[in-house]
Image (cartoon, rainbow, N blue to C red):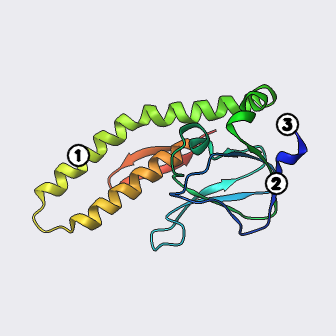
Amino acid sequence: MSDNKMIVFKPDTVILREGEVNEFMFKILKGHAEVYIGYGTKHESLLGILSEQACFGEFGLLLKKPAIYTVIAFDEIIAFRISEKDMDDFILENRKNVLDIMKNMANSMFTMRFQIEMLMKDIEEFSKSGNINLDEKRENLRRSLRQYAIGNAYGHSFTPTASGFSFDKTT
């Protein structure tokens, strides 16, 4: 890849914003980034920290859909910006990253069935309750599902518990 695809992000720079379409993927060469859902809202959740060699933005690049998380530079970041036309070169030069991205996406799809089953169970339980705030429950369910999916995409496993799920970093 040519040097003109390298970008420097200053600390606290929003690189990718949840809900916005971004058609680039980034590979961190130096520095760290924070990954959030609900950034800047009362439901803000830090999902994790990305470090050197990590890639993000693949959903926008591959699907042309809005970002499902916000990524912010924790410290100064030097990153490759990869567009769809750059993918051939990226694949040739970064086979391990491509394989990791594919595994994460496949793992996310695999767990969707479980997540849908849990959602259906929760909806059934909520519908049986007489005194509930459906908007609040719907928002809590939506946020939980996004955390499960995104946490899974970043190498976290989730285990059902009585109160929801516990998250563990997988190696």
Residue 25 lies left or right of residue 79; in this view the side is left
Residue under pointer 3: 1
Confirm or deny contact between disc 2 and disc 3 (CB under 8 A). no
Q: Report the front residue among 87 and 168.
A: 87
Q: Nearer the viewer, mark 3 or mark 1?
A: 3
Residue 154 in sight here: no
Give the quarter of the image for residue 163: bottom left
Percent position (x, y) of residue 137?
Answer: 27, 62
Residue 19 lies left or right of residue 13; in this view the side is left
Residue at 38% over, 46% down? 160
Mark 3 Cα shell of 10 Å, populated few (<14), some (14-19), many (≥20): few
Residue under pointer 1: 121
Confirm or deny contact between disc 1 and disc 2 (CB under 8 A). no
Circle 2 sits in a helix, a strand or a loop, which is it?
Answer: strand
Q: Of marks 3 and 1, which one's residue comes earlier in the chain?
A: 3
Percent position (x, y) of residue 47?
Answer: 56, 57
Q: Of marks 2 and 3, which one's residue comes earlier in the chain?
A: 3
Question: Could you tell me how far apart the alpha carbons at marks 3 and 1 are, in whole angstroms?
Answer: 48 Å
Q: Looking at the image, is 42 positioned above or below residue 36?
A: below
Disc number placed over residue 87 in the picture, else none: none
Q: Of marks 1 and 2, which one's residue comes earlier in the chain?
A: 2
